[in-house]
């Protein structure tokens, strides 16, 4: 019995030794595998989160600053700009400006090649131990590229079966019409004969609108009052290379819609969690006032609560073209009836931030709202946590106005006068022209002489608006 007890004791001691010194032999999962899993987990925890900005143009510095505050590495992808008009290229930051502005990595590509861009981003991420979180378009030309690249990387993106409807104005109208919403009648035309035939078929009369189908901003958009103007517009559009580098084979003829023009900006949030409902938030609403020459004169911020019909229409348009992630900018017209605006009809919608500093002005006018952080969170599949879940719009606590300063005639600028020093509500201003420049008469937004942005109490903004308009003078001599 003594020897039996001794043997049991020795076996127990041996098992204890093996348990403490050679755990891997007895563990269900081998120790060397556990070490690999631990090392892989450590690497993942050390990876830095990164966002990708495609074609950083619109408010790019604000987005970079927001990314920095959120602790995100910023990668900028610069698209080719050779086919852009010179006035557009002047707004594009170069690599030095991007670096100075806080961008960490810059990729410049020669083509809008989704495979190549995705490949370069994946290689960069692997080399720099980055975890790509979201892909964000910061220009109209970046919209289609961003969604396709994000899809290739397995990141948040808008519906790919509607990607063409978010760039081509004709396919855009098809999608919106299919959703049961009102649109302007349209046709694709390649000659004046096509224009005449389409006008007859659609029962249209002048004025009509002719435009590049996948254009940007208000460039290559012509309001034609007669056949002579339409013929000139057709020549200006057809056979040219559009800003996205594609040759324009057909122009878009559209029914001219009267009424008051509005811009409605949105931010859409989705989530990996299927239990979380997608959400689209109306962030700001702007009403345009135009001059007798049909140029933009002013744009003023409105309270979304005052325009429920327009808001409902805008949300349905965004859904119709497949926007579920990121910013959207909708332009529409509506009829004014006894102080209310009804029967909205889309001009176009863009799946991007609005230009004209509207996001910056909204940040200054809405308490506790940072549109640039919201944009990043949206593209990273993060929920909007600032605004109550039951709300579908933001309410401004200040009044904002954007004033457009036109060039009245072609010529050489002799002098520029503008008083902004006395403005109590001045947010910012910009002059796009200088003395000595040869300028053309303003026909679109980017051919303006400059802009002034005001934020404050409405009465003060109105007083400052009068000061700006009365003090602005542009002396131009014939050339």
Image (spheres, rainbow, N blue to C red):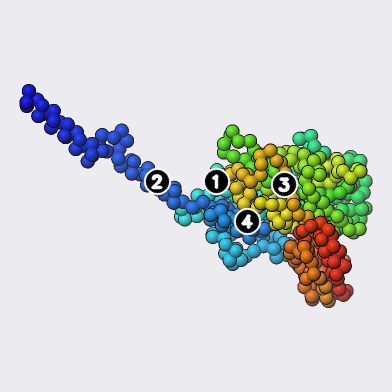
Q: Which residue is mark 2?
A: 40
Query: What secondary structure is marked by label 4?
Result: helix
**Tag 1 residue:** 153
Q: Position of residue 289 (x, y in %)?
A: 86, 55
Which corner quadrant of the image does residue 93 belong to?
Answer: bottom right
Q: Is residue 157 visible?
A: no
- In contact (CB < 8 Å): disc 4 and disc 2: no
Q: Residue furthest top?
A: 1
Residue contact at pointers 2 and 3, CB within 8 angstroms: no
Is there CB contact under 8 Å for labels 3 and 1? no
Marks 1 and 2 sit apart, C-alpha to C-alpha, by 20 Å
For the point 86% across and 41% down, the residue is 342
- Marks 3 and 4 sit apart, C-alpha to C-alpha, by 20 Å
User: Which is more foreground, mark 3 or mark 1?
Assistant: 3
Label 2 or label 3, whichever lies nearer to me, is: 3
Disc 3: CA contacts within 10 A as few (<14), some (14-19) or many (>=20): many
Q: Are the residues tagged 1 and 4 within 8 Å (C-beta)?
A: no
Q: Report if residue 429 is visible in the image.
A: yes
Q: Position of residue 356 (x, y in %)?
A: 74, 58
Q: In this orientation, which residue lies closer to the viewer: 437 or 343? A: 343
Say if 449 sits above or below 348 in the image. Answer: below
SS at mark 1 in the image: loop
Question: What residue is drawn where x is 57% and y is 38%?
Answer: 272
Secondary structure at badge 2 equals: helix
Among numbered discs 4 and 2, the one appearing first in the sequence:
2
Horizontal placement of 245 versus 231: left or right? Answer: left
432 lies left or right of 96: right
Q: Which residue is mark 3?
A: 394
Residue at the spot of label 4: 63
Q: Residues within 10 Å of mark 2 (few under 14, many from 20)?
A: few
| C-alpha gap between disc 1 and disc 4 | 21 Å
Q: Quick one: label 3 or label 1, which is nearer the N terminus? A: 1
């Amino acid at each position: 019995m003594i020897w039996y007890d001794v043997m049991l004791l020795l076996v127990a001691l041996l098992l204890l030794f093996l348990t403490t010194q050679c755990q891997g032999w007895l563990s269900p999962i081998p120790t060397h595998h556990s070490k690999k899993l631990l090392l892989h987990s450590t690497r993942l925890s050390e990876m830095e989160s990164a966002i990708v900005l495609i074609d950083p143009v619109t408010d790019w510095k604000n987005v970079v600053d927001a990314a920095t505050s959120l602790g995100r590495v910023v990668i900028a992808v610069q698209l080719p700009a050779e086919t852009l008009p010179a006035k557009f290229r002047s707004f594009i930051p170069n690599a030095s400006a991007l670096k100075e502005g806080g961008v960490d990595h810059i990729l410049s590509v020669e083509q809008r090649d989704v495979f190549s861009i995705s490949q370069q981003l994946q290689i960069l991420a692997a080399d720099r131990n980055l975890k790509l979180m979201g892909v964000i378009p910061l220009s109209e030309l970046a919209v289609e590229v961003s969604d396709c690249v994000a899809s290739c990387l397995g990141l948040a993106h808008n519906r790919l079966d509607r990607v063409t409807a978010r760039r081509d104005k004709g396919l855009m109208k098809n999608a919106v019409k299919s959703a049961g919403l009102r649109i302007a009648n349209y046709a694709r035309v390649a000659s004046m004969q096509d224009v005449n035939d389409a006008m007859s078929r659609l029962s249209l009369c002048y004025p009509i609108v002719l435009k590049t189908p996948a254009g940007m901003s208000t460039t290559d958009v012509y309001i034609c009052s007669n056949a002579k103007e339409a013929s000139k517009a057709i020549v200006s559009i057809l056979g040219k290379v559009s800003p996205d580098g594609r040759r324009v084979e057909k122009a878009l003829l559209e029914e001219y819609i009267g009424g008051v023009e509005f811009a409605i900006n949105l931010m859409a949030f989705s989530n990996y969690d299927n239990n979380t409902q997608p959400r689209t938030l109306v962030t700001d609403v702007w009403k345009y006032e135009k001059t007798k020459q049909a140029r933009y004169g002013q744009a003023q911020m409105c309270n979304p609560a005052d325009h429920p019909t327009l808001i409902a229409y805008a949300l349905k348009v965004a859904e119709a073209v497949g926007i579920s992630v990121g910013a959207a900018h909708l332009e529409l017209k509506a009829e004014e009836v006894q102080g209310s605006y009804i029967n909205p009809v889309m001009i176009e919608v863009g799946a991007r931030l609005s230009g004209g500093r509207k996001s910056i002005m909204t940040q200054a006018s809405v308490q506790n709202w940072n549109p640039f952080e919201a944009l990043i969170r949206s593209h990273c599949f993060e929920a909007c946590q600032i605004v109550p879940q039951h709300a579908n719009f933001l309410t401004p606590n200040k009044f904002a106005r954007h004033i457009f300063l036109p060039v009245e005639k072609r010529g050489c600028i002799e002098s520029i006068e503008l008083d902004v020093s006395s403005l109590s509500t001045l947010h910012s201003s910009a002059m796009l022209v200088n003395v000595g420049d040869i300028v053309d008469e303003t026909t679109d937004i980017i051919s303006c002489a400059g802009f002034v942005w005001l934020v404050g109490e409405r009465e003060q903004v109105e007083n400052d608006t009068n000061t700006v308009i009365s003090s602005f003078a542009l002396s131009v001599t014939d050339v």
